Amino acid sequence: MIIGVPKEIKNNENRVALTPAGVAELRKSGHTVYVQASAGEGSGFTDQEYTQAGAGLLPTIEEVYSTAEMIVKVKEPIAQEYPLIKDNQLLFTYFHFASSEELTRAMIERGAVCLAYETVEKADRSLPLLVPMSEVAGRMAVQQGAKYLEKPMKGRGILLGGVPGVKPANVLILGGGIVGTQAAKMAAGLGAHVTIMDVSLPRLRYLSDIMPSNVVTVMSNEYNIREAVKTADLIVGAVLIPGAKAPHLITRDMLKTMRPGTVLVDVAVDQGGCIETCTPTTHENPTYVIDDVVHYCVANMPGAVPYTSTLALTNATLPYAIQLANKGWRQACRDNNELLLGLNVVNGKVVYKGVAETFGLPLTDVRDVLRQEELIA
Ligand SMILES: NC(=O)c1ccc[n+]([C@@H]2O[C@H](COP(=O)([O-])OP(=O)(O)OC[C@H]3O[C@@H](n4cnc5c(N)ncnc54)[C@H](O)[C@@H]3O)[C@@H](O)[C@H]2O)c1
């Protein structure tokens, strides 16, 4: 198969969909890979590394789209890429269709086969291509939190781990899933006193078993949150209710009960945020202050560490990309239900329920599409 890797052109996106190591793996399976010149630059990979791994270099994004049967990307195509997409071309990337009707209609119109990273799903309902970015964001939340607790950054002026003879900071983590667990590990490693709250008792039991002794688990409810925020130095919002907006666990009135210089990092901001006063910010201007409380609400935290994020993402996506390249999308999706669930839009038809419902579009059964495709292909 001919695989194309365009340079990401969405604002501030420095990740790339394949590393030179990924190119080498695909080449080993007999595929041809074209990478757009300087596509890996933002993540620290040179054109030379790609060519040494066996990729062909193409100077323009137009040539990548016109040459490739499968496009592997990181972010959804933006408007200037829509006309480049060919009928029947396979696009393997994050789409987040439900957040853009324009994108959904454009992909229907282009007749593309859209396999979305975010809906590839394992039998245990976990989302293997979202996990790596949650891991990055969870670890980063504490790194950022520690920085904004410094006085020049408008924080309380407290060192997370304290020093001998001085108490460490209190870190409160709301949600003990992927983000929360990674944040807790980082904060605990730095010596902070960490409290994780979750509504799932089995999850709290698990965390209590695996976490070091400076981490405690507490049931998440309004009473416990109100008490904990009064003495927290850093609060990390990491809740998720799948398919729904995040609940506002920290309400505006609670800010007045916090100590001046407390730092809030709402990682869940991409789902509406679990802190009422959080609105999305960018890496250029990540924080603002309300009632003397510092708010950090960057919606694409992994974008600040493209080297780590690219490697983490491609570790997870490459095995799927290889299946798609080896078998073609039809057979790969027939053989692997995880990939089948990634199909969102196929040759002008919406095949993912959530997307069809969000925009009131007709839903086609993905298996019917596959049966039809078999007759056509
Ligand atoms: N800002 C970013 O750059 C960025 C990056 C990655 C992920 N995220 C977001 O981070 C959030 C968390 O992702 P995740 O992968 O850790 O999800 P996850 O599903 O692994 O964990 C969510 C946890 O929240 C818990 N929860 C639900 N309701 C709760 C409540 N009322 N109180 C306490 N806990 C509650 C769940 O039981 C679960 O353990 C998501 O919104 C995700 O989109 C943001």
Image (cartoon, rainbow, N blue to C red):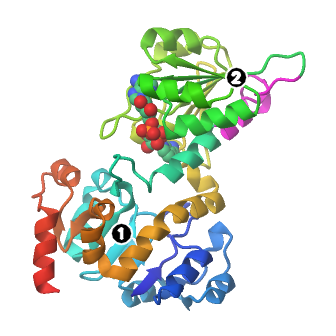
x 73%, y 36%: residue: 147
Residue 197 in the figure: left or right of residue 373: right
Dot 2 corresponds to which residue?
A: 214
* Residue 199 percent across, percent down from the top left: 41, 22
x 14%, y 81%: residue: 374
Is 151 covered by the magenta stretch? yes
Q: Secondary structure at mark 1?
A: helix
Q: Nearer the viewer, residue 289 or 43?
A: 43
- Badge 1: residue crowd in 10 Å (few <14, some 14–19, many ≥20): few
Q: Is residue 330 above or below residue 209?
A: below
Q: Is residue 258 above or below residue 203?
A: above
x 35%, y 73%: residue: 91
Dot 1 corresponds to which residue?
A: 79
Q: Is residue 140 above or below residue 51?
A: above
Q: Is residue 349 above or below residue 283?
A: below
Q: Amino acid at mark 1?
A: Ala
* Residue 225 percent across, percent down from the top left: 50, 14
**Quadrant housing the C terminus:** bottom left
Q: Amino acid at mark 2?
A: Asn
Determine which quarter of the picture holds residue 190: top right
x 49%, y 31%: residue: 278
Q: Quadrant of ligand 1?
A: top left
Tags 1 and 2 touching, CB below 8 Å: no
Q: Mark 1 or mark 2, which is nearer to you?
A: 2
What's drawn in magenta, residue-wise?
Answer: 142-163
* Residue 107 percent across, percent down from the top left: 26, 69
Q: Earlier in the sequence, mark 1 or mark 2?
A: 1
* Residue 289 visible in the snapshot: no
